[in-house]
Image: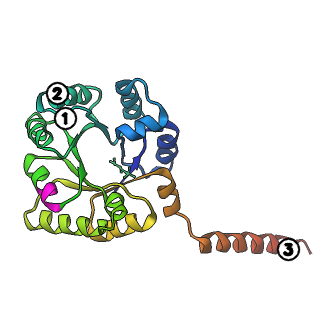
Amino acid sequence: MKFFIDTANLDEIKEANDLGVLDGVTTNPSLCMKVGVSDFEGHIAKICNMIEGDVSAEVISTEYDEIVEEGRKLAAIADNVVVKVPLIKDGIKAIKTFSEEGIKTNCTLCFSASQALIAAKAGATYISPFIGRLDDISTDGMQLIADIRLIFDNYAIETEILAASIRHPMHFLESARMGADVATMPLNVIEQLLKHPLTDSGLERFLADWDKLQESLKD
Ligand code: E4P
């Protein structure tokens, strides 16, 4: 399973990358707003230089011609740019064009399995089902991951399932159980994944016992 970080914050990307387990980055306009990105293309270029994996950069246009123009520009920034396109009619048409041109895409704002299947048919590299936002409206986000996995496996579809809108470790764990190919998570969730109170208390006891041993050897 690939680990992506869901942020436009360069410090957070560096921190996750330094862990040595980062496979990519996803950004979106809201995440860019959060860190006050003023030069979007320059910012994406910086991220692409920092990491080897795929970096999703989202288009703002909603009409086919503009999406294609904007996406081609973004794709030209670096080899690891993935053009993020919303799951709307013109977006699907654009994904088809990008896939014919060999431009990688991440189809975003997916909330149903039928949407995911259409994006895959158009040749999307990644499909991003938003788990947390479904949970927010009392709909089981995890069930969507399971449905898409089942359908993609039925037809040996190669589009990668990128579990997005992950809010806590259980979203990640369930996504892994269900066979999502990628999980994109904020830094705090990545950090929560490696924490366990028994690890901390166990380490504390090991170190204390080691100190006791050293003391006893002095006698
Ligand atoms: C990632 O590609 C998505 O844009 C992101 O995970 C959305 O997360 P949110 O629902 O927490 O805003």
State the CA–CA distance, disc 3 to disc 1: 72 Å
Q: Is residue 210 above or below residue 99?
A: below
Coordinates of residue 68 in the picture (x, y in percent): 15, 30
At horizontal 16% and vertical 56% (from top left) the residue drawn is 116
On the image, the x and y values in percent for residue 155 come to: 7, 63
Q: Which residues are magenta?
A: 113-117
The quadrant of the image that shows the N terminus is: bottom left
Q: In this image, 122 relative to 81: left or right?
A: left
| Residue with the mark numbered 1 | 62
Please name which of the two marks, 3 or 1, marks the residue nearer to the observer: 1
Q: Amino acid at mark 2?
A: Glu
Residue 217 - label = 3
Q: Left or right: where does residue 79 sit relative to residue 24?
A: left
**Residue 66: mark in rendering:** 2
- Disc 3 residue type? Leu
In the image, is 127 to the left or to the right of 53? left
Dot 2 and dot 1 residues touching (CB under 8 Å): yes
Where is the C terminus found, in terms of image quarters? Answer: bottom right
Q: Earlier in the sequence, mark 3 or mark 1?
A: 1
User: Can you say whether 213 is above or below 90 in the image?
Assistant: below
Q: Nearer the viewer, mark 3 or mark 2?
A: 2
